[in-house]
Image (cartoon, rainbow, N blue to C red):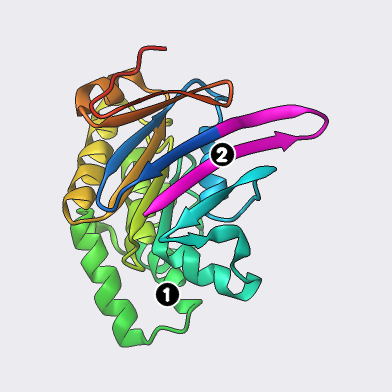
Amino acid sequence: MIKFQNITKTYKPNIKALDDVTFEVQAKEFVCLVGRSGAGKTTLLKLLMAEECPTSGRVFFKNQDVNKIKQQELPLLRRKIGAIFQDYRLLPFKTVFENIAYALEVIGASDVEIKRDVADVLTIVGLSNRANNFPAQLSGGEKQRVAIARALIHRPEVILADEPTGNLDPYHTSDIIKLLLKINEFGTTVILATHNKEIINSLGKRVITLEAGKLIRDEEKGRFVI
């Protein structure tokens, strides 16, 4: 489903963020992408979203080279790949419902579709009773669940979670990880980028380890041992 082929990414003046990285992710997998801050995790996710281009190598999504997709067709790719970030990226003056609905409004969805689909994802993330609250009225864990709901609204085939628990306490961290596992059980591919050892070592999922831009381990049921 996803293939990184001999990916090298260099930033000016001469900083190598990724160094000849190759691996594949199959449909419906749950993959943990681990390494210390600066190891190259976020760069890989940006390359998959075609937010950046590799210096060399190729990135494929469903046999399509993402860097050969026409600019006007990129929004369609990004609707197939939902992204979740550490800082939530919610619009502060919109309610929970409005934050999620906005992703549908920009593609011209009808009011009926918006009402139905937002209600569905709020049920999945357990926030139906928070639809009319603003972000400032939510806990960190609730904000991240809103961000997950927004990522789910287009029914993506892949969820990229970039340090989604970085700002959360252990209780809410566990809550978010359980939700990502639930989403994976629905058949959505999940790539979780994190440097949280406790999360990785408790999951028993595939672990791809990066160190200074190099892929140093790829284990079916791995642990974070850096």
- Observer-nearest of 2 and 125: 2
Give the magenta-colored segment's residue range.
1-20
Q: Is residue 71 visible?
A: yes
Task: Name, please, the residue furthest toward the top.
Answer: 226
Where is 205 relative to 144, above or below? Answer: above
- On whether residue 19 falls in the magenta region, the answer is yes
Q: What residue is rendered at 39% in x and 65% in y?
A: 100
Spot occupied by residue 121 in the image (x, y as percentages of width and height): 25, 63
The reply, left or right, for residue 111 in relation to residue 128 is: right
Q: Residues within 10 Å of mark 1 (few under 14, many from 20)?
A: many
Spot occupied by residue 193 in the image (x, y as percentages of width and height): 42, 35
Q: Which residue is mark 1?
A: 104
Under tag 1, what secondary structure? helix
Spot occupied by residue 141 in the image (x, y as percentages of width and height): 32, 40
The quarter of the picture where residue 9 lies is top right
Quarter holding the N terminus is bottom left
Q: Main secondary structure of the magenta part?
A: strand
Q: Which residue is mark 2?
A: 6
Q: What residue is rendered at 32% in x and 58% in y?
A: 149
Under tag 2, what secondary structure? strand
The reply, left or right, for residue 4 in relation to residue 38 is: left
Q: Amino acid at mark 2?
A: Asn
Q: What residue is rendered at 35% in x and 85% in y?
A: 111
Q: What residue is rendered at 38% in x and 58% in y?
A: 151
The quarter of the picture where residue 66 lies is bottom right
The quarter of the picture where residue 120 lies is bottom left
Quarter holding the C terminus is top left
